[in-house]
Image (cartoon, coloured by chain):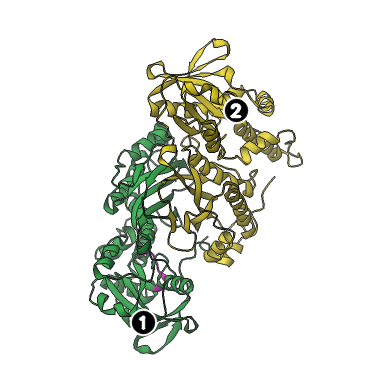
Chain colours: A yellow, B green
Amino acid sequence: MAIDRGKSGELAEIGEFGLIKRITAEAKIKNESTLKGVGDDAAVLNYPGKRVVVSTDLLMEGIHFNLVYVPLKHLGYKAVSVNVSDICAMNAIPRQITVSIAISSKFTVEAIDELYAGIHLACGHYGVDLVGGDTTSSLTGLTISITAIGEADEADLVYRSGAKPTDLLCVTGDLGGAYLGLQLLERENELFRLNPTVQPQLSGYDYILGRQLKPEARVDMREIFKSLNVKPTSMIDISDGLSSEILHLCEDSGVGCRLYEERLSFDPQVQKMAEEININPLVAALNGGEDYELLFTIPVQDHDKVRNHPDITMIGHMTKKEEGAVLVTSGGVQEIPLQAQGWNPLKND
Amino acid sequence: MAIDRGKSGELAEIGEFGLIKRITAEAKIKNESTLKGVGDDAAVLNYPGKRVVVSTDLLMEGIHFNLVYVPLKHLGYKAVSVNVSDICAMNAIPRQITVSIAISSKFTVEAIDELYAGIHLACGHYGVDLVGGDTTSSLTGLTISITAIGEADEADLVYRSGAKPTDLLCVTGDLGGAYLGLQLLERENELFRLNPTVQPQLSGYDYILGRQLKPEARVDMREIFKSLNVKPTSMIDISDGLSSEILHLCEDSGVGCRLYEERLSFDPQVQKMAEEININPLVAALNGGEDYELLFTIPVQDHDKVRNHPDITMIGHMTKKEEGAVLVTSGGVQEIPLQAQGWNPLKND
């Protein structure tokens, strides 16, 4: 499972400018809005009549990823997905990204090629252009910083702040897989560490591994909303866990929420892995994070429009602020206040 | 000289969302183009009829800065300047920045406040809005990633690629100060390390210290070019050293260059410090970097327009590509090929 980080020195041989040429050679421009990509002091973009949408993320080795079990190509792909997901959460179209990396001399040119192979793969998949970035050295691990830029008509933009009481709360796809995929990787890595002759047991878990290692941003939802003639009143992507994201929508919209446990269904692999590590899959969905699905609200009148769509599940509804944000357990037995128990990066070290 | 990085745990107490609220409280919107700043999945910008210009930089503790002698407030200011400088090098107007940081729990809330005090000071000085970012934890040092966004009319943009043979090569301000300021800080830090009772001797060097610790991006040049009725044919900012930047202009424009040693003059503090460490101040200008002045070319017919401007020095002229890029030493004695001996971040570790 270990990754070959290669012989020291190779990167120094090709130097910064050599590395930049190598990693940008594949950066083919696909969007009309990209007038000038890599190669100058700044990229130049053109968005006549559109709003420009900008989001950024910083990924640190040892905090956001572990190169012992995360292949660099997957990491590159995921780093792009995470940022594109933020653009999707605005109901905008992703168009450009900048990618900055800091690497130590432990990395070979081939390792960086792998990382960028994943980045270019994601750029191709999402139709975004790599238009700039920075490459520098690090005294320790790998750092990746990505900024994503997208466009939207003003009328199409969806903020976190537009939910109204009685709006229906919906989510795309299914939840909990990314967190349980990570638990699986960490368990097998720990077993391997204790006994290097043990081969990791990953078969039968391809779905949750894929959710963790190669998440897909929901670039498809913008068109789906259009085809259903639905415009969400508020939207956010699920990076920190369902609880935390619901609370964001509630706070920014000034509303409360009732989330129904019985509305959440789980993939069989999510159920199986949750059972193996003795947790309720609901906990993985609420607090796990990294699913990169979209959480959104729609007017209650739009109920019938989304009811039968296979990518959309109605999981609750918004309420008045005074009613708070609560989880209603199956059968309506209990009402438990939602808490942001999501990932707190400042408590991890 | 050491900085107080404080007691462990304080940051964990306020958490990520608490920290974000704290550091964005001062983020007042100044630009019409900023429709939505911090607080959603992405910022929303509006640039009707303009080109959007985007640049990004990644700064790593131990590579780009040493917190033993760089105050956090200065670091915040400089991190913004470095990015704004790239926007200036396109002859564009800086409008927004995103700031992502990774910090270890060694940092106190007060230390982060200091860093952001510098960031906000720079935002005020340059008239840019802080519109987004990411805060996360780091296993080791401080990481700062900034993306700057600006605007320009298409007709005003200046690329690296427009220089013609016979164009005059010009530079703003003076060079070498930032590099020699760093040498001074490192020398005094080393003396202090060897004997902590020795106080650092920094008096009389305020200019070069300022050049290193608090560089200013040349946001003024755009208006100066306008008032002189001059549009540079190519431009780049001096981050890596004059040699390296001249070679960029030559390569991207397909021209050669003759740089005249006798055209470069140096600040008395630059001369004094260079003497103390036994180097030619020319070397600091050519290979030192971090001066964040603008290097640009203008048509030879514009000679008289810039001749008497106190902020502009003509230091050479472009030639045909075949003639190469050379330094002509004082009195025309020698012609030395320019080499990119600038900072190679991949050789430092």
The vertical placement of A330 against B229, above or below, is above
Q: Amino acid at mark 2?
A: His
Residue labelled with disc 2? A309
- Specify few, some or many for label 1: CA neighbours under 10 Å numbering under 14, 14-19, or 20 or more: some
Mark 1 vs mark 2: in front: 2
Residue B222 locus on image (x, y percent): 30, 63
Q: Quarter of the image holding residue A322? A: top left
Please state which of residues A206 and B261 is positioned toward the viewer in this rendering.
A206
Q: Chain of mark 1?
A: B
Using residue B246 as the reference point, say whether residue A75 is left or right of it.
Answer: right
- Give the residues drawn in magenta, as a range: B286-290
Residue B144 locus on image (x, y percent): 43, 50
Q: Secondary structure at mark 2?
A: loop
Q: Amino acid at mark 1?
A: Tyr
Using residue A199 as the reference point, say whether residue B302 is left or right of it.
Answer: left
Residue B300 locus on image (x, y percent): 33, 80
- Specify few, some or many for label 2: CA neighbours under 10 Å numbering under 14, 14-19, or 20 or more: few
Please state which of residues B237 and A26 is positioned toward the viewer in this rendering.
A26
The vertical placement of A331 against A1, above or below, is above
Alpha carbon distance from label 1 to label 2: 71 Å
Residue B269's mark? Answer: none
Residue B260's mark? Answer: 1
Residue at 47% in and 72% down: B340
Residue A138 visible to an observer of this rendering: no
Q: Within the magenta stretch, is there residue B287?
A: yes
Please state which of residues B218 and B63 is positioned toward the viewer in this rendering.
B218
Residue at 74% in and 33% down: A204
Q: Secondary structure at mark 1?
A: strand
